[in-house]
Amino acid sequence: MNSEVPVQGAFFINFTSLRDLMNGLLTYINDNEIKQVADKIIAGSRLSAEEGLILYNKGDLPLLGILAGITRRRINGNKAYFNRNFHIEPTNKCVYNCRFCSYHKPAGDPESWEYNHEQMLEIVRRFDSTDVTEVHIVGGVHPTHDIYYYAELIRKIKEHRPSLHIKAFSAIELDYMFTKAGMTIEEGLALLKDYGLNSIPGGGAEIFDAELRKKICAEKSSSELWLSIHETAHKLGLPSNATMLYGHIETYSHRIRHMELLRDLQDRTGGFNAFIPLKYKKANNSMGYLGEVSVIEDLRNYAVARLFLDNIPHIKAYWPMIGRETAQISLSFGTDDLDGTIDDTTRIYSMAGAEDANPSMSTKDISALIREAGFEPAERDSYYNIK
């Protein structure tokens, strides 16, 4: 019986086995290193950091797409996931001044904002008559709001809508809250969980190399602290996502090392649901002179991430960041999740120059996007259970 693997859009390659497919492909590959890495991928073997670099440096994009497509189908079949979600961004006032950030505004700036509890609850109430399942809460690190301020916000949201999954606060926000309260990581996370926190997002990871962090986000919490917060969350039963900021001054070696640290942590805890590569956007920040990497580089990065991160089940293409068309194409380069409906509730990437200034898609829109790419739409909850 023949099998099918999508390569680009609705185009399919028919073959009798993965081995037959790869034997055909390998006849056109002249580089022995790439051949050896491809063989390991087909066998389902873990790639080393050196082999990840070979893919980045020598892998042609079509081959990376095929290999990543094989791997994503091995893990997730033909499904492409999405959920019904919205965001709350409490403030864009922040104690940190990251060079890549277009979101931070000082107090008094006409583009700054700071919502109180009632204003944030009003955002929640706007969705009372809808079937949303998740609220994503992340924003700037406010200088005066402490852990009890945010714990009380969680409690109020849960009282209003108990079934709503609350995914909230990057590790950078959490670090500031815990330090301000004089709490350990475990104490702070346990308190927030008691108030109703269900999971944490992956923001703030940026790039884990210490020297690079000094150049782009010197004030921000360390890589070790980010990893420690997520490891502790996992041990307390709070799953999380992981991110990586790419397309600035990092090298392929920095990206592979970043993913290797995430893979090592996932080996220990199994707590990451998804990996989300976040593209550096150049508008309205002090690193804009760098420009932005191409869509080809976006797709290369998604493919290598899928091939290297063998223990993180989902690779997410965050469509408000890269645009709908690129997100659709990325499904053929290893991604299997497009995030959610969002309903125009986030400004983080629109302020950095994202193509979609008012991000919102209906479930019908997302499903159509997925089907046009040759995949099966799968509406999920926050734990990737299909609804």
Image: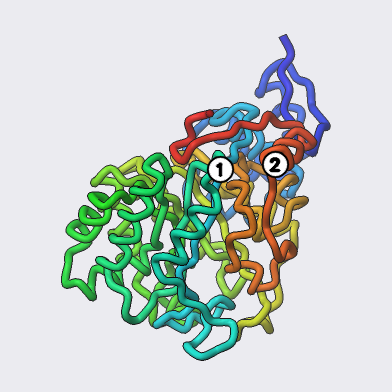
Residue shown at the point (58%, 47%) measured from the top left? 339
Horizontal and vertical percent position of residue 329: 75, 46
* Residue 307 is at least partly visible in this image: no
Density class for disc 2 (Cα within 10 Å; few <14, some 14-19, many ≥20) is: many
Quarter of the image containing the N terminus?
A: top right
Q: Is residue 227 visible?
A: yes
The total of numbered circles placed on residues is 2
Q: Amino acid at mark 2?
A: Ile
Work out which residue is located at the far top of the displayed protein and give it: 1
Q: Secondary structure at mark 1?
A: loop
Q: Nearer the viewer, residue 62 or 139?
A: 139
Instruction: Please state if 47 lies on the left or on the right of 237 as rendered.
Output: right
On the picture, is 348 further left or further right than 204?
right
- Residue 344, quarter of the rendered image: bottom right
Q: Nearer the viewer, mark 1 or mark 2?
A: 1
Q: Residues within 10 Å of mark 1 (few under 14, many from 20)?
A: few
Q: Is residue 85 above or below residue 354?
A: above
Q: 199 or 362, which lies in front?
A: 362
Q: In this figure, which residue is indicated by the disc labeled 2?
A: 366
Q: Which residue is mark 1?
A: 129
Q: CA distance from mark 1 to mark 2?
A: 20 Å
Measuring 35% from the left and 63% from the top, which residue is drawn there?
Answer: 226
Check if mark 1's residue and mark 2's residue have beta carbons within 8 Å. Answer: no
Decide: is 362 above or below 352: above
